[in-house]
Image (spheres, coloured by chain):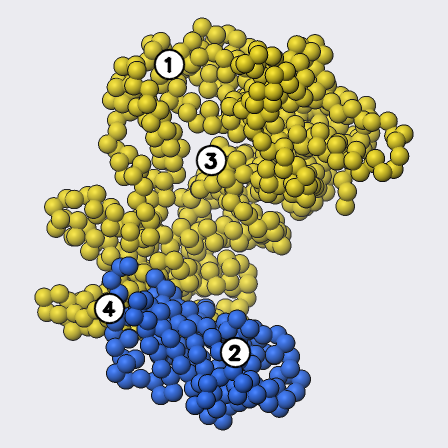
Amino acid sequence: MASLPKRIIKETERLVSDPVPGIKAVPHEDNLRYFDVLMEGPSSSPYESGVFKLELFLPEDYPMVAPKVRFLTKIYHPNIDRLGRICLDVLKSNWSPALQIRTILLSIQALLGAPNPDDPLANEVAEDWKKDESNAIETAREWTVRYADKK
Amino acid sequence: MSGSEFSFSEEGYSSFDEDDGYQLSIGDTDVAFDPDASQVEVKYSYPDATTSTKVPINRIKYQALSYDDVDALLTEKIKSVNGILQVGDDESMVLLQKFNWKVERLLEKFLDNPIRTYDSVGLNYNAVRVQPEKLIVVDPHFFCPICCSEGSEENPLTTFHSGGCDHRYCVNCYATFLKEKTTLTCMDTECHSVILPSELKSLSDCILNAESVLGDASNGLAASKTEASADFYGYASDSATTRGNDYSDDEDAAELDSDGEEIEEQRYLVEYRKRKLEKAVQDKEKQRNKSLYSRYRSKIMKDHVSQQADFRLCPALDCPGIVRFIDFDSNSASSGITGLEQFANQHRSFPIVECSYNHFFCFYCSKDNHVPIPCPIVKAWIKKCKDDSETANWIDNNTKPCPQCDTNIEKNGGCNHMTCKTCCHEFCWICMGLWKDHKDFYKCNRYQEVKDDSPQKENSRRYLEKYLFYYNRFAAHQTSFKKDREFCSKLDFLIQKVQKRNKVSWIETQFYEEAVRILLKGRHTLMWSYAFLYYVEPCRLKHLIEDSQFELSKAVESLSKLIETVKPENIIKYRQRFIKESGLLKSHKYALVDICLDALASDELLISIPT
């Protein structure tokens, strides 16, 4: 494999020396472009009691293209589908090379705190959310307890 | 053979969105596009206004343009819009791009609210932009947040930013970021400031300069430089092109005159063909890819062309040809045709155009040159072939067993008169019948309708049989067409050899090339005529078409056989025969096209296209 770009080295160093509160991202030893991510659910959200596992991969063209991020822990959220894929503008069309791993992870954490059922990825979840929000939030809470690690 | 091949696989036609541009109506009044503005010749989609029996044909008037022609048109359009808006050529271009090159819409929006229109493309109406040449800053203390490189006193970083903001990044990062884009904006997440074409040019020039300095420094190591720049633009440098100049055609041909170096010859032939075909297109392409700016410009132009209903990119693989619709001819006008779809649905319409690189295609459906059959039948046939491709898959084998000795035979040329190498059995590849029966009793172009007296359950089988009958012939000619064209691609090389051996001039060998081209066109017409006849109900006219088709197939097979059997070094001896046979083929081809057009114009012809 080609040597790691300076940008990725810098970002990784900073993730270790100055971690984002509530988020832990550690690169694999054998592949420094592949990160294991642990993300705490944001407070005052149905996910607040849990810690979620994600995987993050920096493609060859990073930072010209967005990192690939996916939830590994099952989660009940209108913008995250059954495979853990995330519908978030900054991961797709609104990606800019000026964004970083940390800013992307923070955006994902913010998405947990502010679900957007009007732009859904998981249609059924989004419908439940729109029909009966309090019930949907309850389900999200239950799923968090059942599938996510305890804080 | 998979059905999708019918969308003109042999040319490697790109998969086009069929609906592309058809929502727009042809003939939109477009202030900036005056047909007379360009000096390119206006052609008709068919040379004559009527068939030989004086049946009028609907034609279109068109121009075959090159990238450069369209580029000039684009510049003109931008200038004329700027003449109204008075905001600058660059700004006009960015605005036009935003409004999909619709002048009317842009003017309407702009006059309604210039500030908001400006804002929508990332321009600031009231701010003064930094001059393009001042956007490149050499800074020893700069840290680029994208690639994390740092400048130093010895090695300062060169930075760039948009004329509308001051978010600086190093030129390499900016160039990589912009290289695939057509909408150019600042890299910052919150800033939507646009980068104007002249500003991009400034960045592009800066990169080019840096590359040439690099090239000079490495003491003229041209190869590494081309590779570096090719790499930069994400283009693998093809050995065939980079080494292209190393070969001098004469030298190599001379070398080949010493016989016995057959392997060398083969290798050269492959190389030569590849080069010959690709060079013209690649040279242009290379020119366009040379700099960030020219890449951008050619992308903009492609976008522009695909968004205009009266332009078509040539669907042939990598062909840079562009065809521009000018008008319908007087026949069409008098039959009340105003739109392209209406035109294409008429049976007597002829929308086949030729791009500047001699590819023929249908202006309406961007498909193959499907003379003599109308677009709706082509559409139905291609769909039918796609649907039934599973059933027809077995047809797509290039080998058939000899009907006499069962030796597997692979067809490696276009001629359908086969002679088995094992048992010397002569047969027709299409119907597998004895060839000697074909001389005066050639029936294999004619489908024998079965008398309708068998039980209902037999019907579907019979439909399939009928389809397979026509499909078989369509596919056989398609395969032969491909083989013939392969042959055509090495023609230049062969002719060169003939010239050397026989000491004749280029002009004296032209009859041969002409014959091969006529054969190709004839076979192509023949191929489509089978698709056409599948939809035609049995009637007097169908028999007439079949008769004419029979004559054409005879002529095609005869010329094909001649081309295949006469060795290139002997062609001069057979000159008269080549000329005679190709002339015959040509007239038979026109006869078939004529008779089809005549039939299409008549009420007698019954066409059943299932809806």
- Mark-to-mark CA distance, 2 and 4: 34 Å
**How far across and how far down the image is residue B262, in percent?**
33, 19
Q: Is residue B417 above or below residue A121?
A: above
Residue at which label 2 appears: A74
Q: Secondary structure at mark 2?
A: loop
Asked if both marks, 1 and 3, belong to the same chain, the answer given is yes
Q: What is the C-alpha distance between the residues marked 1 and 2?
A: 73 Å
Q: Residue at x 52, y 41 (%)?
A: B13
| Of marks 3 and 4, the one in the foreground | 4
Contact (Cβ within 8 Å) of mark 1 with mark 2: no
Camera sees residue B269: yes
| Residue underneath mark 3 | B356
Q: Which residue is mark 4?
A: A6
Q: Chain of mark 3?
A: B
Q: Chain of mark 4?
A: A
The quadrant holding residue B433 is: top right
The residue depicted at 33 percent of the width and 71 percent of the height is A28
Q: Is residue B127 visible?
A: no
Looking at the image, do the residues carrying marks 2 and 3 touch, with CB atoms under 8 Å apart?
Answer: no
Label 1 element class: helix
Shown in blue, the chain is A
Q: Nearer the viewer, mark 1 or mark 3?
A: 1
Q: Nearer the viewer, mark 2 or mark 3?
A: 2
